[in-house]
Image (spheres, rainbow, N blue to C red):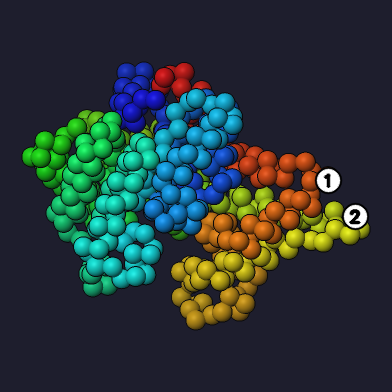
Amino acid sequence: MQRLSTLIHKLIALRNERQIEVTLLAVCPNSVAVLEAAVVAARRSNAPMLFAATLNQVDRDGGYTGWTQRAFVAVLAEYARKYNWDGPLYPCLDHGGQWLKDMHAIKRLDLEATTGEVKASLTAALEAGYKLLHIDPTVDKTLPPGATLSIDLVVDRTVELIVHAESERARLGLPPVDYEVGTEEVHGGLVDYANFERFLTRLRAELAARGLLHAWPCFIVAKVGTDLHTTFFDPQTAARLYATVAPLGSLIKGHYTDWVENPADYPASGMGGANVGPEFTAEEYRALADLCAKERALCHARAGVAPSDFMAALEQAVVDSGRWQKWLQPDESGCDFADLSPDRRDWLAQTGARYVWTAPAVVEARARLYDNLRPAMPDPHGYVVERVAAAIDRYLTAFNLFDSLTLLG
């Protein structure tokens, strides 16, 4: 499997020399079904696939998926074998930085402690065989509310983490790994174009001073219009950023690509990659809701079949997790979950589902749902996987990734 940086250089050359425009897709592996669906979609589209795993999802403690870094890579390999796919599947770290793992913020770790935890997770990612590390030290919980890190400090902390990763890679005798830097978040101060250029200039100088230009990032994350609450991608901004980073051998990567209104504009404007996560969780949620509707019909038709009550178990697990509270609107502050409208409860359950797919009560209810359906529907899990794979196909098509391995090798 070729390095991602090699793939990026090919994308730049194809665009410049043959006007062929391709954007890579990074799927956030927030569940078994999503991971499996991404392998299915990659195989039938003959396309490379990236898997952007946050430390909340996959980490030394198992994250909310239950996977350590090594387990995640092993499960990915299992699905590749299951579907007889030997094409490139890239396990990647997403948002590797201080306080970006929820537990670090909840425990109020100080800078030294959270930096130590991140460094240990970088080492675990390298040992597991990750191909890309997103270095993102753009949060500082020690700052006053509303304050942002200086660009110089963001660069210093970025370099510190890259130096650690490169030192560990050498110690472990591992092959080269690629990097992604930056963030689309305002708290990093990289939204302003002048700050963006300053970040790149100083980062390059600091890496060069340490003899680490071989670790120059192949992806630079930047604000391209989309965020948690907006779905329109700004192709003009993306094209300007492409012109800045492509001569350096890098491409722009966008986060928050979920439900984007104009995905075909990504390759047209030179975007190198895009992350999608919550959208695929929502598709898994809707597929399971549809299976529950089928189960209700089956229970009416067949005597003695007790309903699984899966959706109720899932909602209760989301409530018990407490994570739904971080998405409350200002006018909902202090409300109990039961006080919210049915539409809001459904949205919060759908959005929070990724955190609780592995909760024991949810796993048990899902197993009962599948068991109930099998007499009339032999493969309920396959139905869910196919629904998610179809959602992934939308991006593969829009990003010109169908049969892209014929070009990219």
Q: Are marks 2 and 1 in contact (CB under 8 Å)?
A: yes
Q: Which residue is mark 1?
A: 375
**Is 72 displayed left or right of 94 in the figure?**
right
Residue lying at the far bottom in this picture: please name it: 334
Is 120 placed above or below 245 here? below
Q: Position of residue 377 (x, y in %)?
A: 79, 43
Residue lying at the far left in this picture: please name it: 209
In the picture, residue 181 is in which quadrant?
Answer: top left
Which residue is drawn at the image coordinates 57% and 66% (left, top)? Answer: 318
Q: 153 or 122: nearer the eye? A: 122
Q: Position of residue 175 (x, y in %)?
A: 28, 30
Is 102 placed above or below 207 here? below
Secondary structure under tag 1 reads loop
Which residue is drawn at the image coordinates 15% and 52% (left, top)? Answer: 156
Q: Position of residue 24 (x, y in %)?
A: 42, 34
In the picture, residue 360 is in which quadrant?
Answer: bottom right
Task: Kindly tell me whether residue 191 is visible in this rendering.
Answer: no
- Disc marking residue 319: none
- Disc marking residue 302: 2
- Please, what is the three-letter code of the amino acid marked with disc 2? Arg
Which quadrant would the C terminus be assigned to in this image?
top left
Task: Kindly tell me whether residue 389 is visible in this rendering.
Answer: yes
Q: Position of residue 155 (x, y in %)?
A: 17, 50
Secondary structure under tag 2 reads loop
Q: CA distance from mark 2 to mark 1?
A: 10 Å
